[in-house]
Image (cartoon, grey):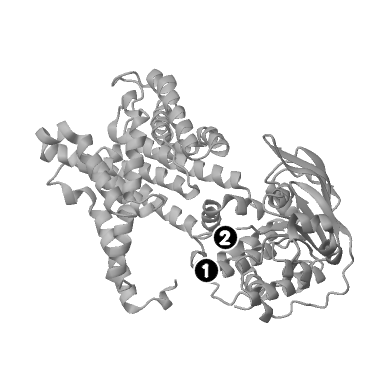
Amino acid sequence: MKLAERPAPMNGVGPVERRDLLVIEELAISFGGIRALTDVSLTARTGEVAAVIGPNGAGKTTLFNCISGLLTPDRGSITFDGHHLHSMGNPMLRARRGIGRTYQTPRLFRSVTVLDNLLMGCRAANAAKRSYDFDPSLRSLRPEERAGRIAELVGYRGSLGAPASGLSFGEMRVVELARALCASPSLLMLDEPASGLDVDQAQGLVGLVRDLADLGLAVLLIEHDMSVVMGVCEVITVLDFGSVIARGAPREIQENQDVLDAYLGKAH
Amino acid sequence: MSVATLTSRTFTTRAAGAGLLAAFVLAGPKLFTWAGPAAAYDFGLTVAMLVVAVSVLAWIGEISLAVVAQMGLGMVTLSWFQDHTSFPLALSLVLVTLSSIPTSLILGVFCLRLRGVNFVIASLAFAGMTQKAFFQKVLGAATSLHGRVSRPEMFRSDGALYYLIALSLVGVVVALYRLQRSRIGTALASLRDSETAFWTLGYSPAAYKLFVVCLSGAIATLAGAYYGLLQGTVPSFYFNPGLAIVYFGFAVAGGMGSIGGAIAGGLFFGAMPKYMEVLWPSIYNKFDFLFYGLVALLIIVWVPGGLAGVGRRLWSRVEGRA
């Protein structure tokens, strides 16, 4: 399987208008006496890939969990597509509004097939009446065809009828990504998508994420592989101990002394 | 898999298997008249139905010990319908099954708030409260005239009642198999695999959990109605929560989550003691729980997947897929 070999997903979509899709302001959450996030603010824009990086325990996944509704922040606000997410407390409503995500450890539905995993995404999109703005040609397809097309798009080369429990780690990653895309998100949150992938696959992932952003998706990425982050992101937010220590373009981040001290080190 | 894609051997073995199963169901208790009365087999069927109710909850990864209480409510509700209405039995059974929804929803609230062992304890508390606060008042502490269920003329004999219960059980099994293979079945399997992913993909775990709790409750309540028809009068102590643990053991021995396994486990462990009471009364009456507890334990420890696992392996060999 090589993600780089996937067919181009372009379907005549023109230049994407960039607008703020997700706006997080002064988000804070504590677990007991531990402050997991302190006054974190960031923005994800359509057509743009934004990364959140930082050492282990910096609060990156906690931030994703707050956005997707799995955790309720103590204070701060999250606005998605002009709506305050406080009024959409649970993850189901947020997913139906267009927030899709993957996990650090792939959470596939292991007792069903790859196709069933993808169809679960397609049916969720149908139930929410979401319309595949990132690739309008998908709208006219039957769910099975749509699932197959998206599997091809992410570079999954295995059988759609294969049980999900039998997939390799790399395949699980791409199938999970395909499932998230099948649900037709407008914001795609990827939690360490390159971990467990080989060099070719990671390069393919960079191209795919770039393509998805070019098609109008807002992508929020947590990643430790700096070649992926620097190769695909326009904006990087660096977290350390739950606080934002830097924000900017990849080059600015690479040269930021605080970031070098806390995370990147001299090698970068 | 369509008929066209089956190999001739697979098709033949499946047709033969279906024929044998149909013959077994039709022959019913007549096959075991040498070992005991038809009522023993009827009892096995009602236990099988109850074990199915326990096993269905495994679809959402939960265990409930309230099924015996729901079974009791089924019997009491049927008794109420017979005392206060002149509805035909079929309509009464449908209404009794539907009457399980309110209590299932109460139990469902626990299921939404609690998981694993905490839900087990909550369901045990629910069963305990129902027994103390309701059954002892309605049915009396020992066998009494309260809570009587009478059989219509057509089902006076245990043999005739067998066909009614068997027909219902076949209906339940077919409905459950179709459900498992539907979109809802896929969604339930997905929910069990990862509730977090299920939720963040845009599905409501609460709706699916409540559905399964209600489904399980409906099956248990229907089993209770049949149990009432079979026994006529049941003392309140029969519906003690501890019995649910025994039925849970049967479900595990049958193969938790498997419908076929639940039927096999329920029928085997439900009917066997009744036959053994007749065949070896002097020994069996002293050691009944010890005996089938031991058999259930042996199956759980040495046969992975329970009776359903054994059945699947045997069937694979018969079909030549091993």
Residue A84 in picture, x, y percent from top left: 82, 45
Marks 2 & 1 on one chain = yes
Q: Secondary structure at mark 2?
A: loop
Specify the amino acid type for callout 1: Leu
Per the image, the residue denoted by label 1 is A167
Q: Which chain is indicated by disc 1?
A: A
Depth check: give the residue in front, A111 or A130.
Answer: A111
Depth check: give the residue in front, B120 or B210.
Answer: B120
Could you tell me if residue B292 is visible in this image? yes
Is B293 on the left-hand or right-hand side of B92? left
The span from disc 2 to disc 1 (Cα, nearest Å) is 10 Å
CB under 8 Å between callouts 2 and 1?
Answer: yes
Could you tell me if residue A135 is visible in this image? no
Q: Which chain is indicated by disc 2?
A: A
Q: Is residue B310 above or below residue A170?
A: above
Residue occupying the point 34% across, 52% down:
B261
Q: Secondary structure at mark 1?
A: loop
Q: Is residue B128 above or below residue A260?
A: above
Is B212 on the left-hand or right-hand side of B245? right
Q: Which mark is residue B183?
A: none
Depth check: give the residue in front, A136 or B36.
Answer: A136
Per the image, the residue denoted by label 2 is A108
